[in-house]
Image (cartoon, grey):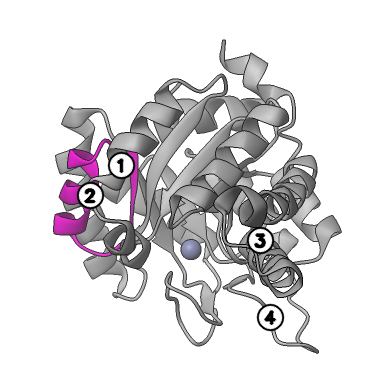
């Protein structure tokens, strides 16, 4: 069943777990993510950033929307890191139930004005809006981000939500997009998270959740974060297994090539869902 992000995260926030948001960019990754959610009876968010959206093309979403509508688990189709109102409109035309507008590279006033414009467009249509303050670091990949992480200031949170009406908020507490280079150990500022969680009127989102230490992610996922974005970790497992299978078998029928890669991706997703404590939580949405 397809929900809005507002509906999805209200339950997660209330019950103190997080819903995983997995970036996809083809039907094999879509299959990996939705089957993993169904096998674990977990709510799930399927998301695409604009470069991923452009890569699959608009027609792709007829399949995605139908697959999610018919799924046994609650699901959201979300635009990750939309940068313009045009990108947001295109996603809504394709059946997305939620969008992110990322004005985090603008100054406070620019970010708030852009976010409010998107909220004013989306809310009458019943679409949820995620915004971002502070900036998440960038290592690689299509989501972008700043070279340096600027931590979200707790005192900006209340004002930003009042100024914009956003339904959820991505905060910067020390993560970066992509896989960290060897030797660089990310560290989450859980103290900042706890301060923000104590005052925020809306659910909080953690981006760049790949390759962070499991304990920290688990702690964040039950201490005020309601949505955690994961792209690199499960896709890396998928493509490493795919390379291995192709090297070993030289097969050229999809049924011989993909199942092991899908299984490897699912294993990582299940591990993340355990950390988020979302396994079995699909029942809460019935
Ligand atoms: Zn992100």
Q: Earlier in the sequence, mark 4 or mark 1?
A: 1
Label 2, label 3: how far apart the Cα atoms are: 24 Å
Residue 153's tag is none
**Furthest-top residue in view?**
286
- Relative to 65, is 88 on the left or the right? left
Residue 58's tag is 2
Image quadrant of residue 222?
Answer: top right
Of badges 4 and 1, the one in the foreground is: 1
Tell me if residue 113 can be seen.
no
Which is nearer the eye, 245 or 214? 245
Task: Locate residue 2, reporting x and y percent.
Answer: 41, 25
Of badges 3 and 4, the one in the foreground is: 3
Depicted 211 relative to depicted 263: above or below: below
Kindly tell me whether mark 4's CB lies below 8 Å from ligand 1. Answer: no
Marks 2 and 1 close (CB-CB < 8 Å) = yes
Task: Locate residue 283, reporting x and y percent.
Answer: 66, 15
**Furthest-right residue in view?**
215
Image quadrant of residue 214?
Answer: bottom right
Task: Locate residue 252, reporting x and y percent.
Answer: 57, 61
- Relative to 202, is 111 on the left or the right? left
Label 2, label 1: how far apart the Cα atoms are: 6 Å
Residue 180's tag is 4
Secondary structure under tag 1 reads helix
């Amino acid at each position: 069943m397809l929900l809005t992000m507002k509906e999805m995260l209200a339950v997660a926030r209330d019950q103190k777990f997080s819903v995983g948001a997995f970036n996809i960019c083809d039907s094999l990754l879509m299959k990996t993510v939705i089957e993993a959610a169904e096998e674990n009876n977990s709510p799930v968010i399927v998301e695409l950033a604009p470069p991923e959206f452009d890569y699959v093309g608009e027609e792709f979403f007829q399949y995605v929307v139908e697959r999610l509508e018919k799924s046994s688990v609650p699901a959201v189709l979300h635009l990750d890191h939309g940068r313009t109102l045009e990108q947001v409109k295109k996603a809504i035309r394709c059946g997305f139930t939620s969008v992110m507008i990322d004005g985090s590279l603008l100054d406070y006033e620019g970010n708030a004005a852009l976010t409010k414009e998107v909220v004013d467009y989306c809310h009458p249509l019943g679409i949820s809006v995620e915004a971002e303050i502070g900036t998440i670091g960038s290592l690689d990949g299509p989501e972008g981000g700043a070279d340096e992480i600027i931590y979200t200031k707790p005192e900006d949170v209340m004002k930003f939500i009042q100024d914009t009406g956003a339904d959820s908020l991505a905060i910067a507490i020390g993560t970066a997009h992509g896989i960290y280079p060897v030797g660089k150990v990310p560290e989450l500022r859980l103290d900042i998270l706890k301060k923000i969680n104590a005052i925020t009127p809306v659910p909080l989102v953690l981006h760049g959740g790949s390759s962070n230490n499991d304990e920290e992610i688990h702690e964040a996922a039950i201490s005020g974060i309601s949505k955690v974005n994961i792209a690199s970790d499960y896709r890396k497992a998928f493509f490493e297994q795919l390379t291995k299978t192709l090297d070993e078998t030289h097969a050229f029928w999809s049924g011989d090539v993909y199942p092991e890669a899908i299984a490897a991706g699912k294993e990582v997703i299940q591990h993340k869902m355990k950390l988020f404590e979302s396994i079995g939580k699909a029942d809460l949405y019935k």
